[in-house]
Image (cartoon, rainbow, N blue to C red):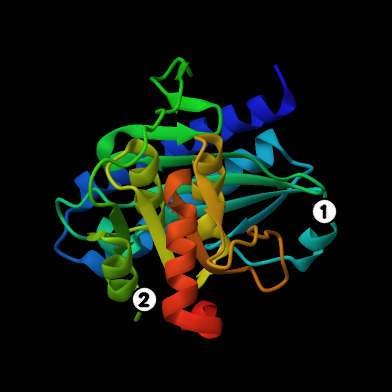
Amino acid sequence: MSDDRADAELAGELATQAGELLLALREETGFDDPAALRKAGDAKSQELLGAALQRARAADWVLSEEAADDLARLTGDRVWIVDPLDGTHEYGEEGRTDWAVHVALWQRGAGLVAGAVALPGLGRTLTTVGELTGADGGMQPLPQRGAPDGAPRLAVSRTRRPVWFDEVAERTGAVAVPIGSAGMKAMSVVLGDVDAYVHSGRMKEWDSAAPAAVAAAAGLHVSRLDGAPLEFNTPERLTLDLLICHPDLAEPLLDAVRHLAGQDATER
């Protein structure tokens, strides 16, 4: 088994385990105090993932939303980029499934080499080597998407809609589909529920790393809004903007963003 495949399978197993913990916590705690539930979810998922990575990959660095950042990671060759609970707000809302767990691995000289996004509310975990299918660790291939048929469907944040999004949608003949977490929006493209995910405004690396890795493995276009590649394990820990889409939509969407948002698109 290649190292990348072993790392991807580990990412999938850990993301799934964290998702199961989060589902159980939801069931046990209930939704009477959403703030307390969200806080506990962040903490308990971080505890599980941090301990598991320490056991399995003790020589690697970890960059996580819920842990102190050791900038010595910048000298490391392998850095796990983790979001123990992506879509914390949605997690605290009863009935919502648009939240996720992200586990990705960045390697010096190669970029993102492995990743997994668990969608616990849907009972699915997508990785860079396939979709995890049960406790035995079996994998099935990632969905193979056909070209969009009809008006493109664009996933957009429920709460942080880019100011120019509606113009881009109009220019490309697209319809907006509001979705919660970044992981769910990206995986909705992978699964064919939408055709693209367009994001502007700063997001953290742990929001984007695993979704970008899985989307790229599924054959989708992944870039910044100016077409440049995403960068990870940076001092700022920021992804300034993001486009994940079917390859046929990449140029029309990039052109629309450039035309309507101008040179300041990545800052709006």
Q: Mark 2 near mark 1, Cβ–Cβ under 8 Å?
A: no
Q: Residue 62 appears at what percent x and percent y?
A: 67, 53
Height in image: 235 above or below 54?
below
**Where is residue 219 shown, x and y percent of the image?**
52, 36
The quadrant of the image that shows the N terminus is top right
Question: Where residue 258 sits: x, y (%)?
Answer: 50, 74
The type of residue carrying mark 1 is: Gly
Determine which residue is flagged by label 2.
162
Q: Which residue is drawn at 63% across and 59% down?
A: 230
* Secondary structure type for disc 2: loop
Which label belongs to residue 76?
1
Q: Is mark 1 on a helix, strand or loop?
A: loop
Q: Residue furthest right?
A: 75
Residue 259 relative to residue 56: left or right: left
Which quadrant of the figure has residue 189? top left
The quadrant holding residue 237 is bottom right
Figure disc tally: 2
